[in-house]
Amino acid sequence: MSLSHDELTTALGGLLPKVLDNCESLISLERLSGGASQETYRIVISGADGKERLLAMRRAAGGEEGEITAQHPGLAVEAKLMRVARDHGVPEPEVFHVLTPEDGLGAGFIMEWLEGEALGARIVKDPTLDEVRPRLAHLFGATLARIHGIDLQATGLDQVLQQLSPEEYVRQTWERYQAFETPQPMIDYTARWLLDHLPTNYTPSLVHNDYRNGNVMVDAQGMVAVLDWEVAHIGDPMRDLGWMLCHSWRFGRAHLPVGGFGQLEDFFAGYESVSGQPVDRQAVKFWQVFGSFWWAVGCLGMAEHYRNGPDQSVERPGIGRRSSECQVDCVNLLIPGPVDLVSAENATQLVDMPLADELLSSVVSFLRDQVMQETQGRTQFLARVASNSLEIVQREMALGAAAAAGEVSRLQVLCANDTDRLQDLRWQLVQGLRDGSVALDSPGLAEHLRAAVVNQINIDQPRYPGLATALDGGKGV
């Protein structure tokens, strides 16, 4: 269903007066984003009273929806979820029409346009939200409890959503990572820990599965809408609480565990005020660990997309290196303790002018001081991503050899293997973790993993707050 913008406008202009009350004509159609799987449009229509009205449309990329699976039930199910949630007191836009094959527009739905802020980095610092921000944690908790309280059978959601147990979710994620064929021992260690600490006492409930700062629209009065339902399933409701607490969604405010804007007690109190049930804090920790584990694998998936398609943009490999952010969060949650950073290699045998580091610095400066200043939108964003990637290369040139040497020496002891091939040693440890021959409490294992991951994040993203937490012995996770 590949339509040009003009063709899409014509088809939509013919459809809207038929399916919407008080719609005289389509005035304009503007595409707002171009994600890999979905498109978002801003629609302006004229009502019968002559007044303009705003709508929004979510549509599959190119109109063609991928295979409908248990993991990705599709846009029609997403629209159903939004309608059901709205009926149960969850702030949602009203869905006016779900596209049908006869409409000739592909898969998608048309809904109410809502105003608010959905970018997490802005929500934690926008001055216009200063008054409401202290109340957000309680509001987020209360709204989440309303989602979890929805009757699956009465609404028919049990017929369209996958049910996923904690064990199935862990194994599914671990298997996805193993298919990448990259040895990341902290990911395997975390998978083993998760399988040893599976929650068992829960009532299968509707799980949003991506409920976090950045997927909830807010304004100065409070919550406007819960967004992005496309990966919802039926499972342990504590999954949503743990995901909300992951460091990745605090946007630099590590001391505020709820989305970078609130405290645990307010979040839990809001949840309990609606659910009437105490929060299972042990299960929340499990899902917080799982969240960092899951996103560590997801970041590697971005690098895999770059290597094998379909998307080979500069953004993908940059996100791939963010796996170490999530891995250091797992370190802080599971094996905190003392750790040292390696020092930069100052000496070099290369004396050409300019030095390689100077060449990289000049390109970083060009991207940040010139390209970013003279561009906007996605080009400006990608220029920032490119400059960040070059800085990773600079830090790896300075720190990588020392970090690798330390890793080799520790692994030689752990694995009783005198080879100096880092990749072989990593694979030996990973295989031992996978087959259970290496116990999680093996002497020296925690110390090695902590040192390896902390030194890696110091290369990949030294400004990530999890690094400071690790260097402080894991305090304040």
Image (tube, grey):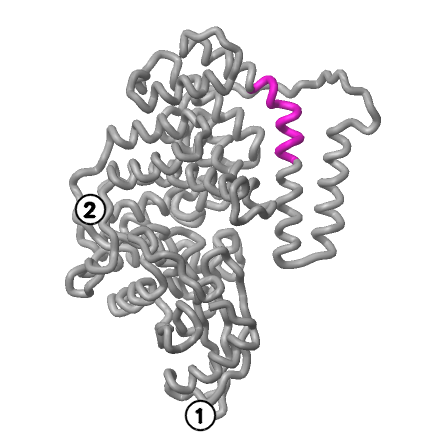
- Residue 420 placed where, x, y %? 53, 11
**For the residues bearing labels 2 and 1, Cβ distance under 8 angstroms:** no
Percent position (x, y) of residue 233? 27, 52
Q: Nearer the viewer, mark 2 or mark 1?
A: 1
Quarter holding residue 255? top left
Using the rendered image of the protein, determine whether residue 160 is visible from the camera's viewpoint: yes
Rendered residue at 17%/44% (across/down): 202
Q: Is residue 477 visible?
A: no
Which quadrant of the figure contains the C terminus? top left
> 279 left or right of 253?
left
Q: Nearer the viewer, residue 431 or 153?
A: 431
Q: Which of the 4 image quadrants contains residue 86?
A: bottom left
Q: Determine the CA span between mark 2 and mark 1.
A: 51 Å
Q: Position of residue 117 (x, y in %)?
A: 48, 62
Seen at 44% across and 27% down, the residue is 184
Q: Secondary structure at mark 1?
A: loop
List the residue tagged with mark 1: 48
For this view, does 234 lie left or right of residue 348? left
Q: Amino acid at mark 2?
A: Pro
**Which numbered disc flags the more N-terminal residue, 2 or 1?**
1
Left or right relative to 100: residue 49: right
Q: Residues within 10 Å of mark 2 (few under 14, many from 20)?
A: few
In the rendered structure, does residue 208 fall within the stretch colored magenta? no
Kind of residue sitting beneath label 1: Ala
Q: Residue at x 35, y 58 (%)?
A: 229
Circle 2 residue = 278
The magenta region covers: 391-403
Q: Is residue 396 magenta?
A: yes
